[in-house]
Amino acid sequence: MRQSFHEGDLVEVQSLKWPKRLTGIAQTRYLGQDEHGVWLGVRRGDSFWLPDRSVGGTMVQTFVKLMPADSYWTALFQDIEPYLDIDISYPVSWTGTTVQEVDLELDVLRYSDGCVVVRDQEDFAKLVADQSVPREVVANAESACAMVLELIQNDAEPFRTIGLGWLAKWANSF
């Protein structure tokens, strides 16, 4: 589904842990949308908030976040290492100008030297055991992790140049 935003519009990103525990809130800027999904931008120094909406701190890096529709992952391209951080997550849900992302703990990281790693497999296993995550969600998360890992290792888009292009455009806009 295409979102009806204009470049620069504020989008609130609510970060959650399974099943739906709010862990943080960030205001982002809508950058655009392409065949990969919605692209959002955050600047170094932007504030983020805790679940009670008190200030949690400031962002230490500039980044763009890709929110694909109906996918078990989101992607973050940043100006620090690792430059690519894929969160394996429940498919994002949009309500107006707010998007919720439910983190499933697994991450796929890529570093500028080409190293690609899967992180937090033990945390994912613990989540599955402790929270009775449905088998279908577990299977979709594991499948998404394997697919994203293969795409990154094969330099497929949007992980090759597209994400970094959005990051460069965003970083050069201020």
Image: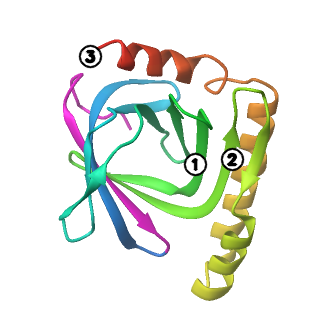
Q: Earlier in the sequence, mark 2 or mark 3?
A: 2
Q: Residue at x 41, y 65 (%)?
A: 16
What residue would you read off at disc 3? Answer: 174
From the viewer's perspective, is 49 left or right of 87? left
Looking at the picture, how far across and down is residue 128, in whole percent? 66, 78
Q: Earlier in the sequence, mark 2 or mark 1?
A: 1
Q: Is residue 6 magenta?
A: yes
Dots 2, 1 in contact, CB < 8 A: yes
- Count of marks, rendered view: 3
The one nearer the camera, 79 or 170, is: 79
Q: CA distance from mark 1 to mark 3?
A: 28 Å
Dots 2, 3 in contact, CB < 8 A: no
Residue 130 in view here: yes
What residue would you read off at disc 1? Answer: 73
What residue would you read off at disc 2? Answer: 108
Single out the mark in the foreground, 2 or 3. 3
Quadrant in which the C terminus appears = top left
Single out the mark in the foreground, 2 or 1. 2
Q: Residue at x 53, y 29 (%)?
A: 36
Looking at the picture, how far across and down is residue 30, in whole percent? 29, 30
Mark 3 is on which residue type? Answer: Phe
Magenta-colored span = 1-18
From the viewer's perspective, is 85 left or right of 108? left
Secondary structure category for the residue under label 2? strand
Q: CA distance from mark 2 to mark 3?
A: 29 Å
